Amino acid sequence: MQKFFTILVGALIALIFVSEVSAQIRRGHDKVVELTTQEASEMWSKFKSARIAGDYAMGFIITHSPRRGENVEYVGEIFGTRRGDETLTRIRVKKVEPKNSPVSDFILSNSARGGIVWKAQGDKFVEVPKADWFKPLVDGLIYSPFDLLMPYVNWQAVYVGGGRIGQAVYFFDLVPPTKDIAKEISRVRIAITREFNSPAQTEIFDAKGDVVKKVSLGAVKKFDGVWLVRQMFARDEKSRDKDKLEFRSASVRTIIDSSVFDATKKPVEPPRIEFKRL
């Protein structure tokens, strides 16, 4: 199996699919040897260009835990595909209670040419301005379209150094190339694991240079021959609120109708896919 076969870059799924060697993550205390300029460049290039074969769909639940107050649960589904050099993601999410809560429905496109986010409004998808990419998917959540789109994988990467976050990682800083994004954030720091070249942690810094959000990798599980992330965590560093994203079911290496990712179509519920429990 190709080492980077199960990593998909350019959307939330960069944190969902991990390579098989993740099952043998070494959590020792051996020294993290610094990369040379060439090695760092090669590592980032491999991370950025990794792909997964076939389409996928996954069911999830998000538990929002405010620093003070009751937990709130959200459920949803995420669909993904690759069309040429474009990564396409569809995500639908809603509150568990009340049962008639409206569904927030997004389509995200990311490529070296840039990212686009659409949100369902009435009987059509409407493009979301970049200034609104940082707003929650649903009121009350921490996760936003920016977290799912991960446009920073196409920004210029600067190698910062090695370290540890439970395991050996290498840090890369990414600075927004445009003023519209720079108004909101000054940089993103991503920690890539030495063992399987997948993001262990992503920190987002505001325009003042303070960390405002942290997204971290959680538990993994082997599913249909592919290592999947079972849990991810997002933390608002100012409010101290947390989101736990847990994947409950999946279908990988499948085929999804292209209309599911077509923002010119009406935002109807995608065709049902047979999921297997994780």
Image: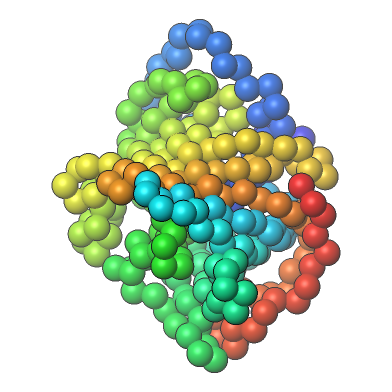
Specify the farthest residue to the bottom: 123
Q: Position of residue 66 (x, y in %)?
A: 40, 51
Q: Position of residue 81 (x, y in %)?
A: 65, 62
Whether residue 178 is visible, yes or no, is: no
Q: Quadrant of residue 137?
A: bottom left
Tell which of 164 and 242 is nearer to you. 242
How many labels sit on residues? 0
Relative placement, left or right, of 152 versus 59 is left
Whether residue 83 is visible, yes or no, is: yes
Relative placement, left or right, of 253 versus 238 is right
Q: Residue at x 60, y 79 (%)?
A: 100
- Report the quarter where the N terminus lies: top right
Q: Position of residue 159 (x, y in %)?
A: 35, 31
Q: Residue at x 33, y 69 (%)?
A: 132
Q: Quadrant of residue 251?
A: bottom right
Specify the farthest residue to the top: 30
Name the colour scheme.
rainbow
258 up-or-down from 123: above or below: above
144 up-or-down from 157: above or below: below
Tell which of 142 and 37 is nearer to you. 142
Q: Residue at x 66, y 75 (%)?
A: 260
Q: Position of residue 24 (x, y in %)?
A: 68, 22
Specify the farthest residue to the left: 208
Q: Residue at x 41, y 20 (%)?
A: 163
Relative placement, left or right, of 22 versus 28 is right
